[in-house]
Image (tube, rainbow, N blue to C red):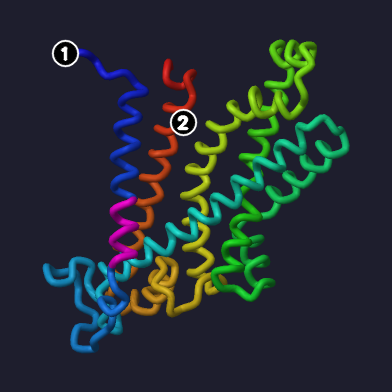
Amino acid sequence: MKKINRRTRALILTFVLALILTGIYALGIWIPDEAAAGSFLNSRQPPSWEHPFGTDALGRDLFIRTLKGMAVSMTVGFSASVMSAVIAVFVGMAAAAGFRYADAFVCWLIDLVMGVPHTVLVILISFSMGRGLKGLLVGIAATHWCSLARLIRGEVLKQKSEPYIAVSRKLGKSDGWIFIHHLLPHLVPQFFTGLVLLFPHAVLHEASISFLGFGLPPEQPAIGIILSESMRYLSAGMWWPAVIPGFMLVMIVLLVDQMGEHLQVILDPYRAQE
């Protein structure tokens, strides 16, 4: 029997993980809002066959609310991750473009942003923009680009020092041609891998900021909102509104993190041969 190599195994696992995440997201989107309506007759029920995750104080099914909350968190996380990755590409390329002052400014800006705790900075940005979805997206996108920008800057500087770049310049190739045909192919793997690895950080920060009351509005079925509401009833013995949605959030983050690791193996030939 032929042994499956590492890249093929990573491709299969990435497909399986992407299928699971897509299924969770699709369920959260397709479930109507009416299904999460509350009933005081069913309030504070522990997990059972009828309500697998139990119900909250208003009688709302926590399984449905968790699925819808995960869909909201994944939407916010993906949107903010795309924005952060695009910012990182432009900033990293600007730093490595060859202008000394631009590189010094970008490095100073990266150190400045990374020197402030992300949660504090996201809260300040979200609060200054009136909270809500817009402030949360801008806050997460404006604070999660630094590591990827530094990686892209280093990759561009490394490729610019390669002999084939000097040969292309000797042959009369323009900077635009060199960027499209030489530099850009090397940035594509870093972009997509960084995008996937940014996603769990964005989801966790969305949940934490909403938990603290500076993110999504209270009527939104987000995981951070569910966890914030559950804190009021922990002393009364209602553990399921906090434990089960929190566990689901951690599982989603771990699944995405594993998918990012496998994607890095697929896109990076050196990792595939380890």
Asked if residue 23 is among those painted magenta in the image, a careful observer would answer yes
In this view, 269 is above or below 190: above
In this view, 87 is above or below 52: above
Quarter of the image with the N terminus in it: top left
Residue projecting furthest to the left:
49
Measured from the top left, where is residue 184 in percent x and y? 63, 30
Magenta highlight: main SS: helix
Measured from the top left, where is residue 110 in percent x and y? 73, 44
| Point 51% across, 72% down: residue | 216
Residue projecting furthest to the bottom:
40
Residue type pointed to by label 1: Met
- For mark 1, does the 10 Å Cα neighbourhood hold few (<14), some (14 to 19), or many (20 or more) residues? few
| Point 25% across, 76% down: residue | 35
Query: Which residue occupies the foreground of this view, 14 or 40?
Result: 14
Q: Is residue 2 left or right of residue 212?
A: left
Q: Is residue 23 left or right of residue 80?
A: left
Quarter of the figure with residue 45: bottom left
Which residue lies under the disc numbered 2? Answer: 264
| Point 85% across, 33% down: residue | 99
Residue contact at pointers 2 and 1, CB within 8 angstroms: no
Which residue lies under the disc numbered 1? Answer: 1
Residue type pointed to by label 2: Gln
The answer to whether any part of residue 267 appears in the image is yes
Quarter of the image with the C terminus in it: top left
Quick one: label 2 or label 1, which is nearer the N terminus? 1
Mark 2: secondary structure: helix
Q: Is residue 2 left or right of residue 248?
A: left
The magenta region covers 22-30
Measured from the top left, where is residue 192 in percent x and y? 51, 38
Quarter of the figure with residue 183: top right
Asked if residue 161 is among those painted magenta in the image, a careful observer would answer no
Measured from the top left, where is residue 7 in percent x and y? 37, 23
